[in-house]
Amino acid sequence: MRQTFKAISTLVGLIFTCQALADNPVWTTSGFKMPESVEYDRAHDRFYVSNVNGGVMEQDGNGSIGLMDGSGKLIEVDWITGLHSPKGLALHNNKLYVADVKQLVVINVKSGKLVARYEADDSKVLNGITINKDGKVFVSDWTGNRIYTLEDGELKIWLENIELNSPNGLWVDNTHLYVASWGKNPKDDFTTETSGNIKKISLKTKKIETLDQEGLWLNMDGIAGYGKHKWLVSDFLKGEILLINDKGYIEKSVKSKKGSADFYYIPEKNLLVVPMLMDNQVIAYRLN
């Protein structure tokens, strides 16, 4: 009876709390080549966009980084070339870090030059990136169930565990690394055997916790903190951006399109910028 009551309460809670995060898009920019991740550069008021432009696991040399201004105007779709299948992006001290299949690529955004490549030969497909306040770089290995860090000029395995559940997007605070997991055993069509979920990993002990989730099916891509004990996450296959609290409830949502990937949230602008991998677009929403 208790479980039945809990299920009914959850359903009622979802009906009344899953409100729209945003209305119509603020702007939509087309012309990209399978955009997977967006990163905002406050110093220069512009966006960087990773173009997969081919198979998501292929080392084909077709990938690039695109450039938009702060209003969403496309400046150059192939601003940086010579990449394979770039995905996650993170900016720190005028260096843009790019997850590119089996490499972590570094670009000096002032000069527009590629300045370093760090190999991870044993990885499956590097995907999400986050950087803490001290400049430590974390990179997820999506189907390899690993988290790498960049240390002393090398990519080293920080954590390897099947419990990571196909780690995709990453977000770090002072004490924990949060992982948007995709789900068990991604197939060729990106569907999975199990739902994805949010993992909370202690930076000190590397203990993995799985945050509560009320039976929801999710293939999580991007993740970002939103206030206290809440996270914005993208569900790639459903085409939604969700606001989830630490009890596992979806409080609000943005219904976007299938292929909603590794977004960027700008708190001071209240702006959510979402790459649409399957539509070759980047869409911005103003959050309510």
Image: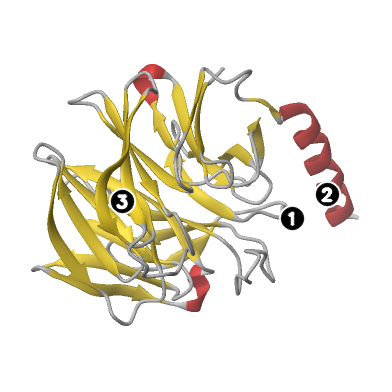
Residue found 22% across the figure and 59% down from its top: 105
Which residue is depicted at the point 50% across and 77% down?
Answer: 162
Front disc: 2 or 3: 3
For the residues bearing labels 2 and 3, Cβ distance under 8 angstroms: no
* Residue 216 location (% of width, % of height): 72, 52
The residue pinned by badge 1 equals 215
Q: Earlier in the sequence, mark 2 or mark 1?
A: 2
Dot placed on the residue nearer the N-terminal end, 1 or 3: 3
Instruction: Using residue 126 as the reference point, say whether residue 212 is left or right of it.
Output: right
Q: Amino acid at mark 1?
A: Gly
Relative vertical location of residue 202 with respect to residue 26 in this rendering, above or below: below
Q: Quadrant of residue 138?
A: bottom left
Which residue does the image show at 22% across and 74% down from the upper left?
A: 156
- The secondary element bearing badge 2 is classed as helix
Q: Mark 2 touching mark 1, by CB under 8 A?
A: yes
Cα separation, mark 1 vs mark 3, equals 28 Å
Where residue 163 appears, as percent x and y from the top left, is 51, 73
Neighbor class of circle 3 (other Cα within 10 Å; few <14, some 14-19, many 20+) is many
Identify the residue at image location x=41%, y=45%: 37
How crowded pointer 1 is (Cα within 10 Å; few <14, some 14-19, many 20+) is rated as few
Q: Secondary structure at mark 3?
A: strand
Left or right of 20 on screen, residue 122: left
Q: State the mark number for residue 7.
A: 2
Quadrant of the snapshot with the N terminus: bottom right
Q: Which mark is residue 130?
A: 3
* CA distance separating discs 2 and 1: 9 Å
The disc at residue 193 is none
Badge 3 amino acid:
Thr
